[in-house]
Amino acid sequence: MKDVRNLDKQWVVLSELSAELVNRGAKVPEIVFDKLRLANSLLSYYILDPHASIKTLADVERELNFVQSQLFSLCDAELTEIYLNKMMKAVRGELDVRFPISKSNYNKEVKKRGRVEAIRVKLQKEMQIERLGDLGEWYGVIFEYSDKKNKVIIEGDIKRVKRALKDFAVIWKEEQNL
């Protein structure tokens, strides 16, 4: 795993502190949870993507500093001491905790190769395959049914897919009104 300068451990401590404060009835601002989610996503991105810039860690550090200032201002003296000790251990890397990496599921149907894209669209109701074939010929794209129920894949040049999708939306609206 890539070195994240113990920011992952700090995130775990701050997440734990936010939960503790909520359990004690403190009014934790919603932005704290937004910033924790953002920091989690940025850390996960940095860890999983081999091409991620080191600047990402500076962004994570900024978010965690904000969260830390918000959370510690809500703590009493006892809780402050407990979590300051945990934070110091986290910064030094002495804390043994697991960071929950958030991974998005890979979808083999949605792909991009150069100027060719494939998108998956949910249908309101099933359409006849012949009609999809006619639309595909008209727009120069490929329409095919997905592995998932009531979903169709549109594949082709980016501009053609966008144009087909715009006109396809009109067809969906008309069919809904029937």
Image (tube, rainbow, N blue to C red):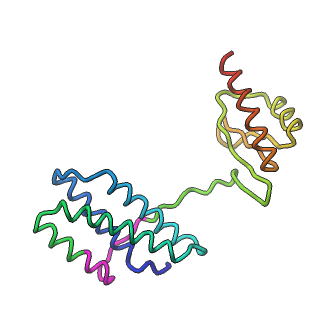
Q: Residue at x 41, y 58 (%)?
A: 37
Q: Position of residue 158 (x, y in %)?
A: 78, 50
Q: Give the camera-side residue of 38 and 59.
A: 59
- Quadrant of image for the C terminus: top right
Residue 150: x percent and y percent?
66, 34
Kindly identify the residue that appears in the image at 74 percent across and 39 percent down.
Answer: 145
- Farthest left residue in view: 77
User: Does residue 161 appear to the left or right of 7 in the view shown?
Assistant: right
Question: Whole-percent x and y of residue 161?
Answer: 77, 44
Percent position (x, y) of residue 92? Answer: 31, 84
Q: Residue at 82%, 29% (x, y): give it.
A: 131
Q: How many marks?
A: 0
Instruction: Depth check: give the residue in front, 171 or 146.
Output: 171
Q: Is residue 154 above or below residue 4?
A: above
Residue stretch in magenta:
87-100
Residue 154 sits above or below residue 177 on the image = below
The answer to which of 171 and 54 lies nearer the viewer is: 54
